[in-house]
Image (cartoon, rainbow, N blue to C red):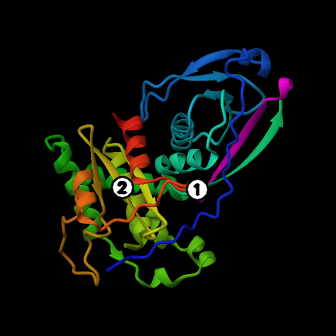
């Protein structure tokens, strides 16, 4: 059964690239330079970001590419930071930056941006992120941590760990067929499209399965990115299995209508070439507002290898 999922984001996240990294940024921005890493992150913990102190709460960061900007914002969001600014040498694709950041986010978020023209004609973009519900996100993380503690043992390898968490999700969740019929505003209010649908109701759509799986993997110390397809109205996970890329779709592994006690593995840790051969998935094409399967996999390799 094709399970519907609509973008419930309604986001206004835009990050405009501006020149400056080669223009002695501390002088342009009026602050000192330092190197920042996100050492607790699952995503390139050794990556060094160039940060310049400025009037923005979290500072100004110099980036070279859409992937670097997406990685930066994803790490900022996951670590609880909610405001920063970005400057870059060349024009970057703003929509791709947003999608890359969303792929790493632990939950749906909204963001606003403001721009200010600097001396020499460059522009700096300040973004402010607002999670849908900060307290709810923290509750979900606590729940995920509890589930990992109760079900995962130190003797398990990564495959066993992922299987246990996949099975817990399928066995404790029903696919919410009624939620699919909700309009956009109702979807924004419904828990079915979030990890809370899994952790609080035991009933969710594919985006809820995907978010919950991501948080469970995070709690187990396993990296994953979130994959979205407008073409399919669907969402799933791209998981790091000992550094190798695997697709995981807990939604399609959960029978509809629900069959208590039954878990399927048709979409469990699938290799990219196998996924392509099946013809089951329809990724979005590479456009100004979407990224393709190739781009998702390149971003995975950038963040998790």
Secondary structure mostly seen in magenta is strand
Observer-nearest residue: 286 or 51? 286
Q: Which mark is residue 135?
A: none
Which residue is identified by label 2? 237
Would residue 131 be counted in the magenta stretch?
yes
Instruction: Name the N-terminal-most of marks 1 and 2.
Output: 2
Q: Position of residue 209 (x, y in %)?
A: 38, 65
Q: Residue at x 77, y 22 (%)?
A: 29
Which residue is identified by label 1? 289
Q: Residue at x 55, y 55 (%)?
A: 287
Q: Position of residue 278 (x, y in %)?
A: 23, 64
Decide if residue 126 is in sight here: yes
Task: Say whether residue 123 is left or right of residue 146.
Answer: right
Residue 26, quarter of the rendered image = top right
Decide if residue 42 is in sight here: no
Q: Residues within 10 Å of mark 2 (few under 14, many from 20)?
A: many
């Amino acid at each position: 059964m094709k399970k519907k999922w609509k973008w419930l984001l309604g986001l206004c996240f835009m990050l405009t690239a501006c020149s400056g990294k080669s223009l002695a940024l501390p002088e342009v921005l009026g602050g000192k330079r330092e190197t920042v890493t996100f050492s607790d992150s699952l995503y390139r913990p050794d990556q060094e970001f160039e940060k310049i102190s400025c009037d923005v709460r979290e500072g100004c960061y110099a980036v070279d590419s859409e992937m670097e900007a997406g990685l930066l914002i994803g790490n900022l969001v996951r670590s609880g930071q909610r405001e920063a600014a970005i400057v870059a040498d060349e024009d970057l694709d703003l929509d791709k930056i947003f999608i890359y950041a969303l792929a790493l986010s632990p939950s749906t978020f909204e963001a606003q941006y403001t721009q200010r023209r600097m001396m020499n004609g460059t522009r700096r973009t300040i973004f402010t992120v607002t999670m849908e519900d900060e307290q709810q996100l923290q509750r979900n993380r606590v729940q995920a941590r509890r589930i990992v503690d109760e079900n995962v043992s130190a003797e398990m390898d990564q495959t066993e760990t992922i299987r246990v968490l996949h099975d817990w999700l399928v066995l404790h969740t029903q696919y919410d067929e009624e939620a699919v019929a909700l309009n956009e505003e109702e979807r924004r209010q419904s828990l079915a499209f979030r990890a809370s649908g899994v952790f609080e109701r035991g009933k969710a759509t594919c985006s809820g399965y995907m978010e919950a799986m991501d948080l469970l993997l995070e709690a187990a110390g396993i990296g994953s990115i979130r994959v979205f397809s407008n073409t399919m109205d669907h969402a799933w996970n791209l998981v790091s299995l000992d550094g190798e890329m695997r697709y995981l779709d807990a939604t399609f592994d959960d029978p509809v209508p629900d069959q208590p006690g039954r878990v399927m593995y048709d979409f469990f840790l699938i290799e990219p070439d196998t996924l392509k051969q099946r013809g089951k998935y329809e990724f979005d094409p590479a456009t100004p507002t979407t990224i393709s399967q190739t781009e998702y996999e390149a971003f995975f390799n950038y963040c998790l290898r």
